[in-house]
Amino acid sequence: MGVLSPTILVLLLFGILRYSGITREMDNKFGDQHLKTVVALIELHKVRFGSYPGSLRELKFTGDWDQIALRSVRYYPNAARTAYYIELESGWIGRPDLKMPDEFWRGTGYDASLKPGAS
């Protein structure tokens, strides 16, 4: 039997950590911060430019740390760029299990009906 390469060992460890549930708390903490950061950037774009961005690449004046948050979400604006749906894809290592209270979304352009596949 051959020796596993360091890359294979790291990927194996990553998989074990991710699917064991041991990272759930940190995934939720990082996910919560990522979501709040991206929503703030999206809403600031609307204030500055009058509409929501067509994609997250249109956001201006983002910092290096913002890039981590931006890669952690999926963003779906409507055609008129007056509303959007956003979903959290990753936290620290795995996918967070979060539900933001309705009050969080009040005053934003978030629209759950824009979720892909939603009726």
Image: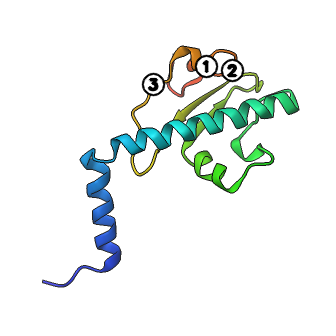
Q: Residue 89: which numbered mark, if any?
A: none
Task: Residue 60: give x, y in percent of width and height.
Answer: 80, 46
Front residue of this view, candidates 118 and 1: 1
Please tell me whether mark 1 sits on a helix, a strand or a loop. Answer: helix
Identify which residue is drawn at 45% across, 40% down.
29
Task: Residue 77: give x, y in percent of width and height.
Answer: 68, 30
Residue 49: quarter of image: top right
Looking at the image, residue 13 sits to the left or right of residue 29; the answer is left
Please tell me whether mark 3 sits on a helix, a strand or a loop. Answer: loop
Query: What distance separates the C-alpha of mark 1 from that of mark 2?
Result: 5 Å
Looking at the image, residue 93 sits to the left or right of residue 52; the answer is left
Looking at the image, residue 23 sits to the left or right of residue 83; the answer is left
Dot 2 or dot 3, earlier in sequence: 3
Amino acid carrying label 3: it is: Lys
Amino acid carrying label 2: it is: Thr
Question: Does residue 89 show up?
Answer: no
Identify which residue is drawn at 44% across, 49% down.
92
> Circle 3 is placed at which residue position?
99
**Contact, CB < 8 Å: mark 2 with mark 3?**
no
Above or below: residue 61 compared with residue 6: above
Identify which residue is drawn at 54% across, 15% down.
102
Quarter of the picture holding the N terminus: bottom left
> Circle 1 is placed at which residue position?
105
Query: What distance separates the C-alpha of mark 3 from that of mark 1?
Result: 11 Å
Please tell me whether mark 2 sits on a helix, a strand or a loop. Answer: loop
> Circle 2 is placed at which residue position?
108
Task: Residue 4: give x, y in percent of width and height.
Answer: 24, 79
Q: Can you name the residue that lies furthest to the bottom here?
A: 2
Question: Does residue 76 show up?
Answer: yes
